[in-house]
């Protein structure tokens, strides 16, 4: 999946602070890049987005057959009218095989992989102008191969994190605290992620750390987030990341991000 803020490029940093153990839990599954690129014996991927979890479930259920089915949607090239027709169909369909395939199509053909819904819950990401959208067959096959070790749930981060046991590692990639009043690209489901949610996430991370369970949280590096995590005993690693979501290429600049580590493992990644 293309996903705003996807963590593939930060895997070295994230893996450098995650402790080894039997299971990795991701309460904000997104693209699943961390789970799919680590060596935990099992993983729990959760998200509140039913379309995302529905796609993952369909892929694990059907495997190669579903991959072949999805490929058909990519064969006609990238066409604006086709995109909006598929988007309308997606918004009218109930959960199921075709809706999941359409979700993958929209993700790869829409603007920058943005996953956005309006207040009525209708997917409204605009058309992306790509010459030849990539069909992620290799990545889908890798996910299928990991299927026996992957558990999925559509649930809140609070409920998901209560499943953590000593020895587990929890990696949280929540919608980020905005850097400005207009920077809300991270609202990828209809229920906005508020500052109260950020505080609640940090409180749960602190509570799990007190039980010997490691929690790592990604976020923008702001005075607000540093204070939030520092006051709860987290160790913080700070660094710069290039952002590519803006329509204006001149605004695709480096911004500060951080990793807040709660729990028993020592921080092995330093600022820089």
Image (spheres, rainbow, N blue to C red):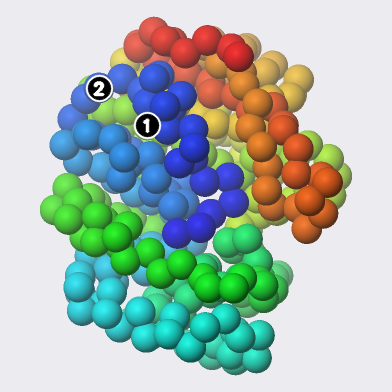
In the displayed structure, 61 sits above or below 207; it is below
Residue 170: numbered disc: 1
Instruction: State the image quarter where residue 114 is shown.
Output: bottom right
In the rendering, at what x and y percent does residue 123 appear?
61, 74
Label whose residue precedes the other's in the sequence (1 or 2): 2
The residue singled out by tag 2 in the image is 20
Does any portion of residue 51 appear in the rendered image?
A: no
245 vs 150, left or right, is: right
In the rendering, at what x and y percent does residue 182 appear?
84, 49
Instruction: State the image quarter where residue 33 is shown.
Output: top left
Q: CA distance from mark 1 to mark 2?
A: 11 Å
Which residue is at the front of the view, 160 or 96? 96
In the displayed structure, 154 sits above or below 26; it is below
Q: Which residue extends farthest front? A: 131
6 vs 121, left or right, is: left
Q: Residues within 10 Å of mark 1 (few under 14, many from 20)?
A: many
Q: Residue at x 39, y 20 (%)?
A: 16
165 vs 232, left or right, is: left
Q: Residue at x 32, y 66 (%)?
A: 137
In the rendering, at what x and y percent does residue 58 appear?
29, 71
Screen quadrant of the N terminus: bottom left
Q: Residues within 10 Å of mark 2 (few under 14, many from 20)?
A: some
Which residue is at the front of the view, 2 or 62? 2
112 vs 254, left or right, is: left
Mark 1 secondary-structure assignment: strand
Residue 29: numbered disc: none
Does any portion of residue 250 appear in the rendered image?
A: yes
In the displayed structure, 160 sits above or below 185; it is above
Q: Residue at x 72, y 33 (%)?
A: 254
Query: How many labels sit on residues?
Result: 2
């Amino acid at each position: 999946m293309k996903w705003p803020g996807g963590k593939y490029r930060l895997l070295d940093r994230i893996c450098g602070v995650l402790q080894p153990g039997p299971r990795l839990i991701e309460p904000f599954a997104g693209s699943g890049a961390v789970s799919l690129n680590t060596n935990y014996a099992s993983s729990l991927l959760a998200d509140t987005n039913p379309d995302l979890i529905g796609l993952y479930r369909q892929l694990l259920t059907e495997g190669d057959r579903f991959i072949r089915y999805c490929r058909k949607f990519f064969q006609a090239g990238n066409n604006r009218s086709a995109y909006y027709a598929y988007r309308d169909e997606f918004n009218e369909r109930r959960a199921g095989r075709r809706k999941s395939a359409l979700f993958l199509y929209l993700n790869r053909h829409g603007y920058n992989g943005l996953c956005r819904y309006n207040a009525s819950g209708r997917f409204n990401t605009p058309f992306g102008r790509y010459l030849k959208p990539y069909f992620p067959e290799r990545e889908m096959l890798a996910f299928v191969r990991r299927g026996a070790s992957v558990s999925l749930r559509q649930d809140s981060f609070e409920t998901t994190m209560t499943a953590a046991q000593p020895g587990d590692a929890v990696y949280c990639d929540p919608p980020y605290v905005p850097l400005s009043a207009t920077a809300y690209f991270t609202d990828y489901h209809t229920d906005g992620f508020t500052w109260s949610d950020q505080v609640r996430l940090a409180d749960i991370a602190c509570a799990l750390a007190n039980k010997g369970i490691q929690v790592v949280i990604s976020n923008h590096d702001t005075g607000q987030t540093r204070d939030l995590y520092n006051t709860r005993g987290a160790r913080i690693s700070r660094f710069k990341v290039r952002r590519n979501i803006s329509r204006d290429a001149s605004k695709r600049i480096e911004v500060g991000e951080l990793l807040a580590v709660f729990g028993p493992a020592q921080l092995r990644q330093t600022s820089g």
